[in-house]
Image (cartoon, rainbow, N blue to C red):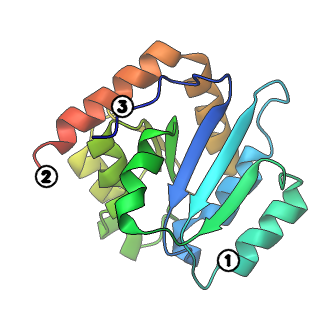
Amino acid sequence: RHPRRPFTADGTLRLIHHSNLQRIYGLDRAIVALAALPSDLDWRLDVYGDGPWRDRIEAAITESGVAERVTLHGRVPIDALPALLAGSDIGLVPSLPEPYMQYSLSTKLLEYAAMGVPVVASDLATFRHHFTDAALRFVPGDEPAALARAVTELAADRAGTVAMGLEAQRQAAAY
């Protein structure tokens, strides 16, 4: 019901993250990472959800100077989420590498994969148990520079990135 937009169809790399905006989801660190993307890369990050870490995320946006590129949309109805995911190019799952998170399987990760949205995700044990390197771009969850490199490389390899999203979708079908 929600066809995927062609990768960077309008010339802008559309990144997405949706969550309860908790500290452990690492979005503030991801925002710091995105500020280091090459200046010639046109990108936007749409964030859906709300939660107790919102103030820290807003501070990261301000401190990183990316307010014109990052939009905190707040909560949206769950029925609206599939269309929002379909309109994005890359999903971000920058969870922190804490002991609890090693055994947590992110719903957002499964949602991105089910929709065929390519994903940059923290290199966590449970994520690796369910997906291969062909399906996700794994990065250390506590290294913003690695996330920035991954996004830059995926943006430059459109065909490979689309193929990765399709492989994630194939691997997620079992779930």
Res 29 quadrant in image: bottom right
What's the residue at 83%, 51% (across, down)? 66
Please state which amino acid type lies under the numbered disc 1: Arg
Q: Earlier in the sequence, mark 1 or mark 3?
A: 1
Residue 126 drawn at (x, y percent): 28, 58
Res 163 quadrant in image: top left
User: Where does label 3 land, which residue?
Assistant: 165
Tell me if I can see residue 106 in this picture. Answer: no
Q: CA distance from mark 2 to mark 1?
A: 30 Å
What's the residue at 58%, 34% (across, down)? 150
Residue 71 drawn at (x, y percent): 71, 57
Local secondary structure at mark 1: helix
User: Where does label 2 land, which residue?
Assistant: 175
Q: CA distance from mark 1 to mark 3?
A: 28 Å
What's the residue at 53%, 56% (across, down)? 17
Left or right: where does residue 109 sit relative to residue 146?
left
User: Where does label 1 land, which residue?
Assistant: 54
Tag 2: Cα neighbours inside 10 Å, few (<14), some, or many (≥20)? few
